Image: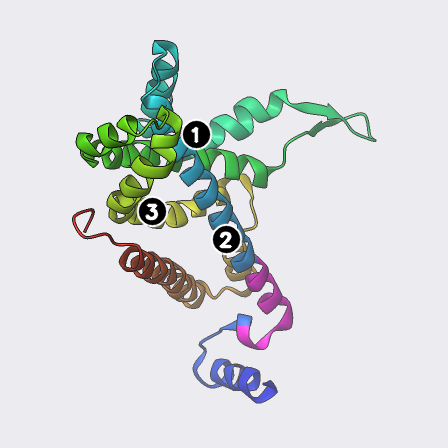
Amino acid sequence: MELFWAWFRWLHESTGINLTIFYDGFDRGRFASGLLMTIRLSAICILLSVLIGILGAWLQGSRLQFTRHVVYWYIQFFRNTPPLVQLYFFYFGIGTLLTTTGATSGPVPMVTNVTWAVISLSFFAGAFNVEIFRSGIEAVPRTTVEAAESLGFSRFRTYLHIVFPLAFRISLPALNNNLVNLVKTTTLAYAIAVPEMLYVTSQIWSDELNVPEMMNVLLVAYFALVGLLVYVMHRWERAIRVPGFGA
């Protein structure tokens, strides 16, 4: 492995292509930590946004008008405002109100920047997921729901065991697109100093003055990360496909 790292040092000395993340242990560690943070942030936001989408789609069919209005305005707020503005709203607007007194008698935030990034990005993507799952639910034939009701299924059991499994299959292509956008949107966490891949990469190129090299590395890294997600989602989509439902 040392020969592999040494080759990149030789490449820098011979051609000027300065890929310090390969031959410098400190930069390599920084980039690896940023990559892991991006993966962790993406995974948590994907999970939470899907859960929000499922719950929101269920509540849209509530018999209570107040509940439907809450879901409606949640969707309108997060779909019609820029995600960066939302991130700033949570971090600077709400975050500054949730403080405690530290050891130096100064204000200390009760919620970390990483947590605010997770909350903001999950709500942002979740608003789109609500509409994605709603469209999937509406595509399930009414006769299927009526058949479940005739067998004595409650509204919740009908949704959980019959409607949602079919709607999920129908919704997968659109859900795939939204989750891909979510992974790319995690770069906005840079704005509140979350040490994800873009943030640590900018630190590296500021220290090493290798902007072109690190921009290319960043592009390839996101291409690979998003490509892996697309591959997994497409395999999952084919695995659970039901004839007559979805693609």
Q: Which residue is mark 2?
A: 38
The number of callouts visible is 3
Quadrant for residue 218, please give it: bottom left
Tell me if residue 35 comes above or below residue 188 in the rendering: below
Q: Tell me the kind of residue under disc 3.
A: Asn
Q: Secondary structure at mark 2?
A: helix
Picture coordinates of residue 100 (x, y %)? 73, 24
State which region is magenta.
22-33
Q: Is residue 171 left or right of residue 47?
A: left
Q: Which residue is mark 3?
A: 181
Measure the alpha-carbon separation of dots 1 and 2.
Answer: 19 Å
Mark 2 closeness class: few <14, some 14–19, many ≥20 residues within 10 Å: many
Residue highlighted by disc 1: 86
**Is residue 70 left or right of 148 when viewed as pictured?**
right
Q: Is residue 30 magenta?
A: yes
| Distance CA(mark 2)–CA(mark 3) | 14 Å
Q: In the image shown, does 104 or 4 lie closer to the viewer?
A: 4
